[in-house]
Image (tube, rainbow, N blue to C red):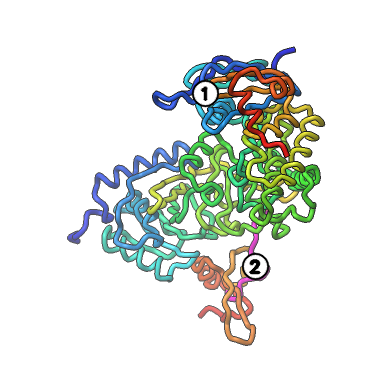
Amino acid sequence: MTQDYNFAYLDEQTKRMIRRAILKGLAVPGYQVPFASREMPMPYGWGTGGVQVSAATLTPEDTFKVIDQGSDDTTNAVSIRKFFEKTAGVAVTEETEKASVIQTRHRIPEAALREDQILVYQVPIPEPLRFLEPRETETRKMHSLQEYGLMHVKLYEDISQHGAIATAYAYPVRVSDRYVMDPSPIPKFDNPKLEMAAIQLFGAGREQRIYAVPPYTKVVSLDFEDYPFEPTKADHACDLCGAEDSYLDEVILDDAGNRMFVCSDTDYCRSRREAGHVGRLGEEAA
Amino acid sequence: MTPLLQVRGIEKRYGARIGCADVEFDLYPGEVMGIVGESGSGKSTLLNCLAGHLKPDAGQVIFDTRADGPVDTVTMSEPARRMLGRTDWAFVHQHARDGLRMNVSAGGNIGERLMAVGARHYGDIRARAVDWLDRVEIAENRVDDRPSAFSGGMQQRLQIARNLVTEPRLVFMDEPTGGLDVSVQARLLDLLRGLVRQMGLSALIVTHDLAVVRLLADRLMVMKDGHVVESGLTDQVLDDPQHAYTQLLVSSVLQV
């Protein structure tokens, strides 16, 4: 196949620069490494950071999968998948099992990942302290001196206003007993999965930061002694596949109050239905 | 008795201009020192140098730490100095909005210092926040209100509560009553005097208001053009001023 693009769109020098940042991020888990983010052929907020990390990570032998809120077939996922099909010519898949590099927006796949897989997150705002302390100079100092009391002020405010920790996504974690990290806007249901076998890379394009969590690294969700961290999900089973352990999306069906809950991870849901599981509104697999 | 704070030859210059120079004094535990002078006399510069917000060009600020005894805070490591700033030191700003987080509730503001030193029990943090609101005469049901919903006097009292909750030993105050009307000032001064005596705090109060130091301070330093021109017991300096500038300052106060 003749290529109109350099492999994976970016030039070799840029990929090298990004790989350096990734290696540094892996060496210092949770630390936000600045990098010279490039202009990508998509708008900021569509995953420019994740795309650059994926571009620097992919090899011609890789199998690539993209999910957006767990789903393989939404606009964002489809266009990024097509982008790398065109610019890198790599194999693509929708099956979590078969993928070697998975780019994700706002979810961790339900299936446990393996040591030979890489999970790439798209991150809008990498700085967990940003909304509490707007000065970058100050937040950097707070990270370097481990002054993280402010993070608990946010959780305190949640409890005082809502009676419980109401932060449901982008729930702050402490990585390897050192850096407080924003795990990108994944639901807090996914937080316990951050301690996994796969490499996790986080790319924020507009904010020009890369950070990483190496395999089997300790990741603790922040909480109070009397208000411990609780992963939450809708209290239902999936209406298509009947799964009770997966994160669910709520779908409104009509204006008469009918609704259904379905797995946000479409691949997980499909594989369960193929295995013969049927939910409340599901049909028998053919 | 070891002085809590020993200040030796503090000097801060802004280019060729002098911010403050050759300031020396000792502050003993439980003592309140007033620093007065006109605008531009270097009193705020001095306070910021002592509290570690500005780096002095020369001199030593030796603080009697709980763990290691007297240590020069100018040369100590930044993490250690910032730790002091959250535990044994407190800083009350002239404008409450400089010292408060305006988008965080009153309880969160008071709890911040506790959480910064490792408190992780919501119930305890909240109980202490409510206790401190009571001590600064703010109604308990305001604990979840943001400071922006408070009056100027309440904001200032909240700032004091937020600073004193970790039971510091030394409080720096920069014009704590500035910008408040006289009846609110009187109430705040009364409150401060009570807290300082009750907790045995040492304090450094920078002000241009002689009434404030008359009420609160045991000793007084008068500054002019970056230098200390007169110092002594408050009543002695105010009732029998020696230096020409102090005489002018004392005679400038309107008698009602």
Percent across and percent down for residue B84 are 63, 28
Label 2 lies in what chain?
Answer: A
Q: Nearer the viewer, residue A216 or A223?
A: A223
Q: Nearer the viewer, residue B90 or A49?
A: B90
In this view, A117 is above or below B118 = below
The kind of residue on which mark 2 rests is Ala
- Mark in front: 1 vs 2: 1
Label 1 lies in what chain?
Answer: B
Residue of label 2:
A234
B253 sits left or right of A48 in the view: right
Percent across and percent down for residue A279 are 62, 76
- Write the residue at 74% across / 28% down: B201
Name the secondary structure under disc 2: loop
In this view, A6 is above or below B186 = below
Residue of label 1:
B226
Percent across and percent down for residue B45 are 53, 29
A101 sits left or right of A161 in the view: left
B143 sits left or right of A183 in the view: right
* Residue range of the region highlighted in magenta in the rendering: A230-240
Name the secondary structure under disc 1: loop
The kind of residue on which mark 1 rests is Gly
